[in-house]
Image: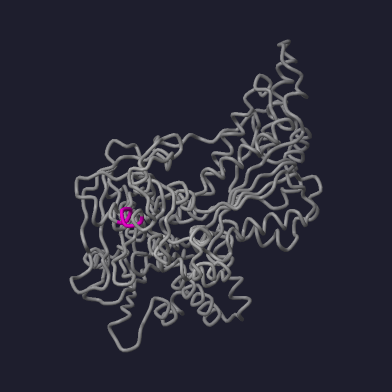
Amino acid sequence: MLLKELAAAASPLNEQQVHKLTQVAAELSATQLAWVSGYFYGISQQAQGLTVAPAASAQPAATLTILYASQTGNAKGVAEALKAQADAAGIQAGLFNVADFKIKQLKKETHLLIVTSTNGEGEPPDDAIEFHKQLKAGKVGKLDGLHYAVLGLGDSSYEFFCQTAKDFDEYLANAGGKRLLDRIDCDVDYDAAAESWSKSAISLLEDALKVEQAAANGAVVSLPKTAGVYTKKNPYQAELITNQKITGRDSDKDIRHIEISLEDSGLSYQPGDALGVWFDNDPALVDALLAQVGVAADTKVKVDDEVLDIREALIRHYELTQGYASFVQAYAELSGAKKLLKLVEDKAALREYCAEHQILDIAREKKTKLTAEQLQGALRRLTPRLYSIASSQAEVEEEVHLTLGVVRFEQKGEERSGGASSFLADRVAEGGQVRVFVEHNDNFRLPANGDTPVIMVGPGTGIAPFRAFMQEREAQDAGGQNWLFFGNPHFTQDFLYQIEWQRYVKSGLLNKISLAFSRDQAEKVYVQHKLRQQGAEVYAWLEQGAHFYVCGDANQMAKDVHEALIELVAEHGGKNREQAEEYVDALRSAKRYQRDVY
């Protein structure tokens, strides 16, 4: 019951008391409110003659708030683990998405931990755009009473590695906040570093914030436990039941429709979520790398608490199919390869080189004999790949579907392939096992109101979540209009799920479909061109409350679509550039413009 409703209810409080409580509550954070409830409970027990610890000693005035800004769910997962560590240490903590946290609330906080990822070219995650903007502009004022620490998640292959974490750290310091401990910038294999940082943070906070459990009186607010026990660290051994190529025989692309059984797992997902897939490296690739650096396959190494042959360790535990700067630098120093040493000095050239070379290719720049320990120390740990889920459980029940583009290319006459994509496409037979988990993505959701129109832009494998959207809207008998923009090279070879889209058009569920087959005419046509061509109607849909979704390539397509969206808003909304950008930013803040890009 809300305080404002108390006076009208059968309450022991008079109107004046209700008014006072309302005023006090408005000034408190969620964590402080939880403490106050415990404090009042303690007083009530004393009034009844029960023996309790003095209420004032139940918890100091200091509080802990944990904020997360997450694009795909990784930062949220780290923040939830951090909250669990705080709970275990007897520290009462509030956990919030920055999108749900008012920036002025920072003035009332005493201890703050932020876990954030970085999106695209150093941009904040979608759920943190407004928070980042206001913090940068100094809207929060002075934070002299705040003690804080920031943990960043990112990918060092990008130029603006962990930029959002760096920004938050800087802006809070500029506002007068005091660092509890130094910021840490974690790479893609972040688990160990994040866990170590979290332990350090909780250890520093224990003396100031520890709550005596006997005196807490149940005031600690806990998160609901997630359904199912399978996670990134404890994946489900699932059966791959379908592996079907859905591009034509003459297509330049090898795109597969993958179906995986989740029967008896208890795993559930929503349209917009991703499936995490753990994979094994190709044994032939591992053998070639070991031969290149002169390490015997049966050499023993330790991985975590397990002793393995290095061949098995490389197959199961280390990243070999993506180039990364840390390996280039380590191998350059070990080998003395002039080309690599020069690359290390040029970050832009190094990023471009890593994007086109796998670990074996880097090692082939100069043949060098390494020890097993040197090789292991230069490599980073394997991380699972995340794929946008292409199904709704309302339709497929205990299955999960993926739309998978198999990565294949040549490097100096030799074929190279993607780690997870080739594993699923080539090395797991139907009936075989694959380790999976669900990665929830609250930043990519259908509107709660089924009558809301949606516009979906998903070229190539970016079509995946929109197949799930349509299955869900059909199952819910949603009345909102649906418009799909899809593109690929050729109509005859690359129209993914063509029969399904035609059925949706015929049934009336899909009201509009705009197709951009880039190579079917002399001039290339992409989805952003179709958006501009139909800009007046797109803008009209937005004015009617439509949600706008983009899924697919982050490096080019998503940027071009974003630019097209700003331009069509300016043209058809009668706005200048700045006003159009503000309009689009407002869509994002309202969660009406959502992106799942990679």
Q: The C terminus appears in which quarter of the rendering?
A: bottom left
Is residue 287 covered in magenta?
A: yes
In this view, the residue farthest toward the bottom is 522
Q: Position of residue 354 (x, y in %)?
A: 46, 66
Q: Position of residue 402 (x, y in %)?
A: 31, 55
Name the residue located 26 percent from the left edge and 71 percent from the top edge: 495
Closest to the observer, 116 or 551: 116
Is residue 538 covered in magenta?
A: no
Q: Quadrant of residue 66?
A: top right
Q: Could you tell whether 94 is left or right of 173 in the image?
A: left
Q: Could you tell whether 300 is left or right of 41 in the image?
A: left
Q: Position of residue 68 (x, y in %)?
A: 59, 49
Q: Is residue 558 above or below residue 84?
A: below
Say whether residue 492 is visible.
Answer: yes
Q: Position of residue 424 (x, y in %)?
A: 28, 54
Colouring chosen for the image of the structure: one colour
Q: The N terminus appears in which quarter of the rendering?
A: top right
Q: Quadrant of residue 18?
A: top right
In magenta, the rendered stretch is 285-289
